[in-house]
Image (tube, helix red, strand yellow):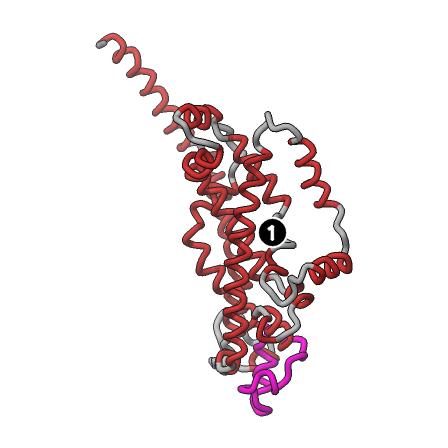
């Protein structure tokens, strides 16, 4: 035992000296400096537009028109925020967006997970055909008019199903989840089957607990897509009280919604609202996603890196 320790100790000493040598190399120090500079520039380039938009949304229109707003609000005002939030229809559409996003995301996650888990089984008969059907839809679609006729004929108009069901499975997300499930050790599922678990029990009690990273990543992808989506609701929602907030804000920017729909906006406030409306719209639509992201960030990083190292 002593001989083994004595034999291993020099090896560990060599390893430590090698690590110290790498850290003290001039080239390695230069790499760290250059890497730090590049990452700092990336952070600045990424954050600057967001900070600028927030500053514009809180600035007076005269400073925005003259181009004096950069990173700090000029002529601080929250008039446009107050104008939008004082309208009851804004909050109605906002609640619709939350409901549509949550419902559609849950449906998409369930369907994508089940489909991907099935496709990950190489012994499944007809697996190639199922994969081919999914990939085929990435390149060929029915078109706008056939989709509209189909949704209308099924009686899905003016309901959440018109938004959730036609976009329930994103093929790219499906293939990513399939690759993740294929990377899981098959021995775990075989041991669970020996213990008496059926297919659903294996998926719910073995596979999904090991797939938190990829599931969280897919939740983020789907939630962002449904939150920002407006065209499906624009097609299939006939009543304003059913619109998501993206259509409400889009109509404000396009000038399609007048004072009769936003009663809080008076003629005296129109100039200020027009000057900051785009910035306020961006802030209001991105803020919920920015608030949710920190809670799933660690899972998102692990999920986005899947496939880099195969287990």
Q: Residue at x 63, y 67 (%)?
A: 158
The residue tagged with tag 1: helix, strand or loop?
loop
* Outermost residue toward the top in this view: 3
Q: Which residues are magenta?
A: 253-278
Residue 92 rendering spot, x and y as whole percentages: 52, 74
Residue 274 rendering spot, x and y as whole percentages: 61, 81
Depth check, front residue: 83 or 6: 83
Q: How many marks?
A: 1
Task: Please say if 291 is above or below 137.
Answer: below
Check if residue 228 falls in the magenta segment: no
Task: Please say if 13 is above or below 183.
Answer: above
Q: Residue at x 54, y 31 (%)?
A: 182
Residue 9 rendering spot, x and y as whole percentages: 28, 16
Q: Quadrant of the N terminus?
A: top left
Location of residue 267 by image quarter = bottom right
Depth check, front residue: 154 or 279: 154
Location of residue 276 by image quarter = bottom right
Q: Residue at x 58, y 68 (%)?
A: 244
Q: Which residue is mark 1?
A: 168
With 169 as the anchor, is 4 left or right in this view?
A: left
Task: Tell me the crowding category of disc 1: few under 14, some 14 to 19, or many 20 or more residues within 10 angstroms, Cα based.
Answer: some
Check if residue 269 falls in the magenta segment: yes
> Can residue 237 be spotted in the picture?
yes
Task: Please say if 89 is above or below 170.
Answer: below
> Can residue 38 be spotted in the picture?
no
């Amino acid at each position: 035992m002593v001989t083994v320790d004595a034999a291993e100790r020099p090896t560990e000493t060599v390893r430590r000296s090698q690590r110290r040598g790498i850290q003290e190399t001039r080239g390695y120090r230069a790499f760290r400096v250059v890497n730090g500079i590049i990452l700092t520039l990336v952070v600045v380039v990424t954050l600057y537009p967001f900070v600028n938009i927030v500053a514009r949304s809180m600035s007076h229109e005269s400073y925005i028109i003259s181009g004096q707003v950069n990173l700090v609000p000029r002529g601080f005002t929250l008039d446009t925020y107050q104008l939008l939030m004082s309208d009851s229809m804004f909050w109605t559409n906002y609640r619709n967006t939350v409901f549509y996003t949550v419902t559609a995301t849950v449906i998409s996650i369930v369907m994508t997970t089940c489909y991907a888990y099935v496709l990950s089984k190489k012994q499944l008969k007809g697996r190639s055909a199922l994969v081919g059907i999914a990939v085929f839809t990435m390149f060929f679609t029915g078109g706008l008019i056939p989709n509209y006729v189909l949704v209308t004929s099924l009686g899905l108009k003016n309901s959440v199903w018109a938004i959730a069901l036609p976009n329930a499975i994103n093929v790219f997300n499906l293939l990513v989840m399939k690759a993740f499930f294929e990377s899981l050790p098959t021995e775990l599922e075989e041991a669970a089957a020996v213990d008496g678990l059926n297919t659903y029990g294996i998926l719910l009690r073995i596979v999904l607990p090991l797939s938190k990273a990829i599931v969280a990543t897919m939740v983020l992808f789907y939630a962002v897509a449904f939150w920002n989506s407006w065209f499906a609701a624009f097609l299939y929602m006939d009543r304003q009280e059913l619109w998501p907030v993206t259509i409400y804000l889009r109509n404000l920017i396009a000038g399609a919604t007048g004072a009769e729909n936003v009663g809080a906006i008076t003629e005296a406030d129109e100039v200020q609202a027009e000057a900051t409306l785009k910035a306020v719209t961006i802030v209001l639509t991105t803020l919920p996603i920015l608030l949710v992201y920190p809670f799933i960030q660690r899972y998102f990083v692990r999920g986005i890196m899947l496939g880099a190292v195969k287990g």
